[in-house]
Amino acid sequence: MHPLLATHQAEAAQRLGPDVHRYYAGGAGDQVSLGEAEQAWQALRLRPRVLRDVGTVDTAVELLGTALRTPVLCGPAAAHRLAHPEAEVATARGVAEAGSLMVLSTRSSVEVGEVHAPGPWWWQAYVVRDHGLTRERAARAAAAGAGAVVLTGDVPYLGARHGATRLDLTGRPDPGDQQDPSIGLEAIAMLAEASGGLPVLVKGVLRGDDALECLDAGAAGVVVSNHGGRQLDRAAPTAEVLEEVAAAVDGRGPVLVDGGLRSGLDVLCALALGADAVLLARPVLWALACDGADGVRDCLDAVTDELAHCMGLAGCTTVGEVGPDLLHRRRS
């Protein structure tokens, strides 16, 4: 783990109330998936190239036509006000200052039109039982400037989160605002239409065949994710399935990944496995709790700077030069 992220994590545990910390930090079931996430990235090994000119290293990427300084993005997480009084407004400011992109949660503490993100951002969607409400939210996000919709596909209903506190974030929600467990691939087209044609990525993909079905149904890309270990416990670590999903997508759209990434070295491994970018969620929350927008900026900058350093050590000057040949395949 990057030292700054470790500091933020430790300080946030002291700053946040115990219920809030458990809500953010906990996982589903026996928290097996939660515990394996970081270890799976650390188990990967690399074969760096030597005698390459790495006097200049550039971490810039382009995602769906948007130029970014870094492939290290801010993933969606609910209720940022529990971490900081400026909530998602502060998060968005810090992300923009880092030259990155924010994915704003449906369960944001701040209404989508009130965040006023100064940089590029996408909107994360749940399809709730009231499809009219889902359409309305998608239209509002598009009107507010979202560049894409990220459909969370792995929450037909909430996982059994014994390790995470249940917090009532919305009072007593109308049943129509609860996730619709009956939705299928048709939700991709519904969100694209409701948002006025925004690209839709599907989050929660852990299988190559699922990735292909999502693309064939109109998805612009996928996010390899097991929901931070908060849905189906014992779901595979994203580090172990990313390569299969990226191979199935085969350049038809961007592949993003989250889950346990805690350093620039982890990001380098994710890029080598086929990711176009990564998403950090819990590290951003810890940074927000510690130092607001400045903390978020410093978190993303730290991981990006470490990525640049590791790219140079691996013999890569651009993200496009990071490929599967850098991975070391261990003999059993």
Image (cartoon, grey):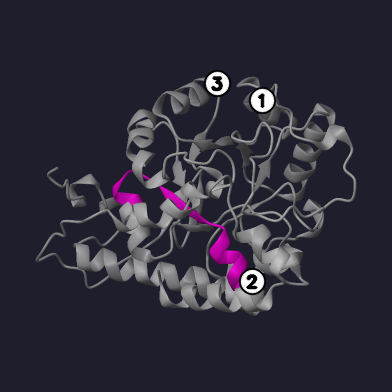
Rendered position, 196 above or below 117: above
Rendered position, 159 above or below 190: below
Q: Which residue is mark 2?
A: 288
The span shown in magenta is 270-287
What element does badge 1 sit on? helix
Label 3 crowd (10 A; few <14 / some 14-19 / many >=20)? some
Choose the circle earlier in sequence order: 1 or 3.
1
Does residue 234 appear to the left or right of 195 in the view shown? left
Q: Nearer the viewer, mark 2 or mark 3?
A: 2
Type of amino acid at the residue the image marks with label 1:
Ala
Q: CA distance from mark 1 to mark 2?
A: 32 Å
Residue 217 tag number? 3
Residue 258 appears in the rendering: no
Q: CA distance from mark 2 to mark 3?
A: 36 Å
Type of amino acid at the residue the image marks with label 3:
Ala
What element does badge 3 sit on? loop
Q: Can residue 281 be found in the magenta stretch?
A: yes
The N terminus sits in image quarter: bottom left
Does residue 83 appear to the left or right of 5 in the view shown? right
The C terminus sits in image quarter: top left
Image spot of residue 134 (x, y percent) = 78, 34
Image spot of residue 318 (x, y percent) = 30, 58
Label 1 crowd (10 A; few <14 / some 14-19 / many >=20)? many
